[in-house]
Image: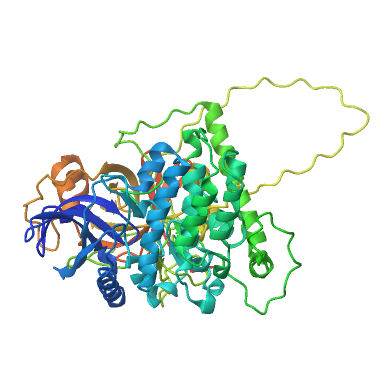
Amino acid sequence: MRLNDLLNRQLGPYRIEALIGRGGMAAVYRAFDTRLQRHVALKMLYPQYLADTDIVERFRREAITAAQLDHPHIAPIYDVGEDDGLVYLAMKLLPGPSLADVLQREQRIAPERVAVLVTQIAAALDEAHQHGIIHRDIKPGNVLLDSRGNAILTDFGIAKSLDAPSLTESSVIVGTPDYIAPEQINPRLAPNGKVDHRADLYSLGAMIYRMLTGRRPFDGPSQTVLLAHLQDQPPPPSEILPALPTSLDAVVARAMAKHPEERYSTAADLAQALSDSLSETTEVGVVFPPAAIRREPHTRQTTQALKAPAVPAATAATPPPPAAEAAPQVTRQSGLRSLMLPLTIALAIAVLLGAGATLAQQWAKQASGSPAVPPGTTEVAEVASATATTTRTATTTSSPTTSPTPSATATSEPTATATITTAPATATTQIVVVNPQPPATTAPRQATVRPRPTNAPAPRPTNPPAPQPTPKPQPQPTTPPAPQPTATTSLPNCQGLLTGGFGNLWRNSPELRSAIGCPIEAEQAGYSVEQIFQGGAMYYRQEDSQFWVFNGAVSGSWRKRLDVFDSDPEPTDQAPDGLITPASGFGRLWNKDAAIRQALGWATTPEEGFTGVLQRFDRGLMLYSPAMLGHSKRIYVLYNNGTFEVFKDTYTGP
């Protein structure tokens, strides 16, 4: 089931009207309460999490606890319930923008306004902390503004409710790392191994940094940001904006101390220290160029796969003590660095290699004047946002007799499970953890030679070499020339973003590597749906509201469509015996587009939901599909020339 399939449906007393927000674990709708005749914000867990009774129960229990909070700067919770197999939470609907929207538009906020907002947010946090509730996901997207511009904190209790044992024991974290506290990445840094209210103070300090300077404390790839939260200090705010008082530097440094016991005791203490330091502030008047501001996720959240740095055992040898840090408030760096130094070196090399190559490609593109793809284009082979490798989590309708779908196999069998080993981490609203599945007991057959498919992508045309004149013999020197070094072939220096199955496929397939180029973003995870047809397949990705239509079983052509078919009718034709008439979004698209209907034919399997994977490259993208619907794990490789190939996924980890 897709998010838009719920529009105009009745769920308990609530009539769903519009999708207004998406997160890593749940979606938010505007709904009308038919009993009390008022609009509410209805938050619902994604279908793939409904099978986990622990998640559902904790969601319900913590929502009830959070509903007890009564504070003018906390969004009130009205109701929690379940209907038609869906779990929902009804909250007050706030018409104003989020703080993320404001920062996206204005880039930064005036210091006196920051002091007011932080005082309001701090009051809300202290109220929750006194009731034993930890937010764990403080960020601009979770702060809404009412009609008077007051800050209203949302999502109380929900992030904590998702911190289930079944989640924290897995190896892939999906979420936004910009404001996460170090102990949420590595619980060993938390007192007694348990995250407490001071994690919220760290996140609030990071958000203060963002509001005042127009920049996040740390920027870069997700892995780099996570590692920075564990061991680095951000540049002092007064170095970024000299008009800010230097006393503010100490406030931010203490709020963002790596160890919880070195931070402020309460949010009110932090807010008061901030107000005192900002009383020295004059008008800053600095505007950052838009290119320096990365987009804040809000209405449409984009999650990323985060590779939480693994922490060596406590018995590992202690490295030499680090040099003194500039921030005076943080005094316990050596213990943390002793945990992180071995990994830091390895990760830094990988990140630098990947980042350097990506920048080089971007400069090269700018120099060549490559035209940009128009934003409204839907037919061209446009690349969507990236995702992380995960495992199948949910199914939909009952399964009829299915016919296995053949898969193209590579010379060295690649896969698409970007398995990432991490240390245990605490999940938040936007931090989703996916348990990797063990390999099948019977390993997929690996072909020693991959035959070329009959309808493989046409090779790029090449101009025949012009005839060269026969060179005239030249007199040879009496002294023989110095021997020239033999050229060696190596992989392009752009492997920093390549992991797991996608990376394995890319490294072992020279033709594919040449055709698709280097990755331009890391993998990201997202709820996806797939259905197999007589003449190909359909693949839907919820985060992008995009359909991919594949004409061909193992290779052929592909096209992309935006999910704008909610008002169109579903097909009413009766499929022949053993075949299926597509329904919902796939059915509407199939029914509306005669060319797609003719090319694909009838469906041979029901649609099935799962947590899928997408990664963008210079000249295409890769999509991951787990073992289901009669096929083994596989990777769709989409080229920007409109063709695709399917490769079997046999990757089982390092």
The quarter of the picture where residue 170 lies is bottom left
Task: Judge whether residue 411 can be spotted in this image.
Answer: no
Side (left or right) of 113 relative to 511: left
Residue farthest along the right direction in this orientation? 478
Q: Is residue 364 above or below residue 299?
A: above
Residue found 14% across the figure and 60% down from its top: 579
Quadrant for the C terminus in the image? bottom right
Side (left or right) of 66 relative to 192: left
Task: Judge whether residue 83 can be spotted in this image.
Answer: yes
In the rendering, at what x and y percent does residue 520 appear?
50, 45
Side (left or right) of 26 relative to 413: left
For the image, the number of numbered tags is 0
Residue 287 or 636: which is nearer the viewer? 287
The quarter of the picture where residue 49 lies is bottom left
Side (left or right) of 84 relative to 111: left
Quadrant for the N terminus in the image? bottom left
Residue found 18% across the figure and 46% down from its top: 589
In the rendering, at what x and y percent does residue 85 appear?
17, 69
Residue 640 or 358: which is nearer the viewer? 358
Residue 582 or 134: which is nearer the viewer? 134
In the rendering, at what x and y percent does residue 186 appear?
53, 69
Residue found 53% across the figure and 32% down from its top: 365
